[in-house]
Image (tube, coloured by chain):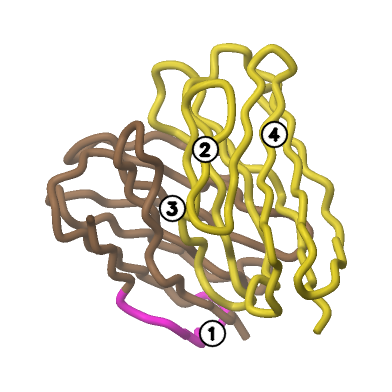
Amino acid sequence: DVKVTQSSRYLVKRTGEKVFLECVQDMDHENMFWYRQDPGLGLRLIYFSYDVKMKEKGDIPEGYSVSREKKERFSLILESASTNQTSMYLCAVSRGAYGYTFGSGTRLTVV
Amino acid sequence: QKEVEQNSGPLSVPEGAIASLNCTYSDRGSQSFFWYRQYSGKSPELIMSIYSNGDKEDGRFTAQLNKASQYVSLLIRDSQPSDSATYLCAVKPGATNKLIFGTGTLLAVQP
């Protein structure tokens, strides 16, 4: 089974900072996803990538960008962090018909 | 808009009882169905997948699928306090690798 690693479990950043969230898989799956999860709102898709350098916007891409330079790594970038981006961020890797495997999540607080 | 609907709960059951969690989906072309368990502050973990009509059992868990009614359910037998978590239903429509998630049902098992 694929292992999905998110580099930080907790992060505290200041408003206006540029923030990088990293996600790394230990296999060769093509599809990777970034979600944020907020109480009462469920999982909301920010961006996804189906191959190196390929990306598509999800449901809430505003204020975010992504980078996928290598197949195993998918980065989420908050260009200028704002307090409304305080959330739990979850990276997921698709195993096709077998569903997703999630990373352990990054709880980001923007102050 | 493809949708997955779940009752948010909380669903409260006594220890040892059967917990029944339900999910409906809108896309008739959906092929694969998943149940994820998410403990508070943790990331979702896959507990069951089901692909064809009928029941699928794994230990204390049984997933049920009825494609004609567009309905998926998860039964947890002999519920334990450790089963207390949010259960997310996810559906894989057609050819895409992108899952559609419900907002989750909070299950509370009372000792």
**In this structure image, what is the colour of chain B?**
yellow
Q: Secondary structure at mark 2?
A: strand
N-terminal of the pair, mark 2 or mark 4, is: 4
- Which label lies toward us, 2 or 4? 2
Q: Are marks 2 and 4 in contact (CB under 8 Å)?
A: no
The answer to whether marks 2 and 4 sit on the same chain is yes
The answer to whether marks 3 and 1 sit on the same chain is yes
Between B82 and A28, the residue placed more toward the observer is B82
- Pointer 4: what residue? B4
Q: Quadrant of the N terminus of chain B?
A: top right
Q: Are marks 3 and 1 in contact (CB under 8 Å)?
A: no
Q: What amino acid does circle 4 point to?
A: Val
Indicate left or right for B52 with A24 as reference: right
- Pointer 1: what residue? A14
Q: Secondary structure at mark 1?
A: loop
Q: Secondary structure at mark 4?
A: strand
- Mark carried by residue A34: 3
Q: What amino acid does circle 2 point to?
A: Lys
Q: Quadrant of the C terminus of chain B?
A: bottom right
Q: Are marks 2 and 3 in contact (CB under 8 Å)?
A: no
